[in-house]
Image (cartoon, rainbow, N blue to C red):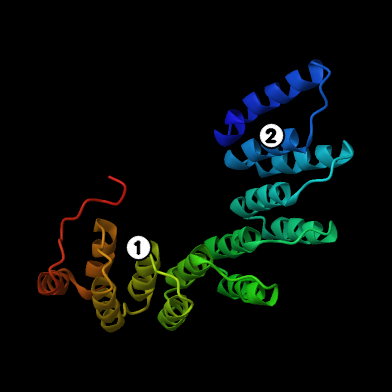
Amino acid sequence: NSYAKNGDVAGASHWFDDLCKASLTPDKVSYTAVIESCARSNRSDEAGRWFLKMLDAGLFPDLITYTTVMSSAARAGDMSDAIRMFELAMQAKLTPDVICYNTLIDGFARQGDVESATHWFSLMPVAGLRPNLSSHNSLLKCCSRAGNVPAARKLLQATLASGLNPDLFTWSSTLGACANASPPNWEDAEELFRQMVMSGMHPDRLMLQTFARTVGSRRCSEICRELGVDQLPQQQGK
């Protein structure tokens, strides 16, 4: 419902209480709605409590419910709890989908844990799942923050080889790895920037700032003039 989508925990809880007062028995959709409101408002503990209430009510959560609690725990940085929910879903004979795996990959990426993020990424093909662009981008984000240029470039090539079309976030993360390397890797940054422009992708203002930080403002301007790139683009979404 609208309370869940807006992260209005108080409103969702009040709506749930109204169901009970009206002698209506809340179903798993009702519980999941309250859990989602907790997740959207970053209240992981409350999401977990409502999940337990759901079990106590004799209801069987579906994969959406498990994923919602998992996502809430991951956003709170509690990856052990997120993995526990993943394992509980499997014990309940549910089959984790791409979204479940992406939730764990992104959670570890937020923490800069390249090894764990890569581990969950590698498990997807084993489970018969094909990583999507979000899977690749989450792992790229991790490589970017670590300044790991070889890993970022390897993942970019894997993205292209898998038939996926890199988006602006993909290229920004790969360039970000060059910027965050010590020292900044200007040679790879130039090569990647040219490759991106030749692919038809246009940089936004934030990407140009990252590129200039890596290769220097003067060199950035030279390359942009050479490639016909607008150096004052509108920020994406504006």
Residue 39, position as x, y percentages in the image: 63, 42
With respect to residue 96, does 190 lie above or below?
below
Say which residue appears at 63% left-offset and 55% top-offset: 74
Q: Amino acid at mark 2?
A: Val
**Front-most of residues 54 and 94:** 94
Specify whether 56 is left or right of 130. right
Is tag 1's residue or tag 2's residue first in the polypeptide sequence?
2
With respect to residue 14, does 222 lie above or below?
below
Residue 11, position as x, y percentages in the image: 63, 24
Specify whether 78 is left or right of 6. right
Residue 168, label in figure: 1
Say which residue appears at 49% left-offset and 77% top-offset: 162
Distance of label 1 from label 2 (alpha carbons) = 34 Å
**Front-most of residues 47 and 234:** 234
Kindly indicate whether the residue at mark 2 contacts the one at mark 1 (C-beta within 8 angstroms). no
Say which residue appears at 60% left-offset and 72% top-offset: 121
Which residue, as the protein is rendered here, is positioned at the far front?
A: 163
Residue 34, label in figure: 2
**Front-most of residues 103 and 143:** 103
Q: Amino acid at mark 1?
A: Leu
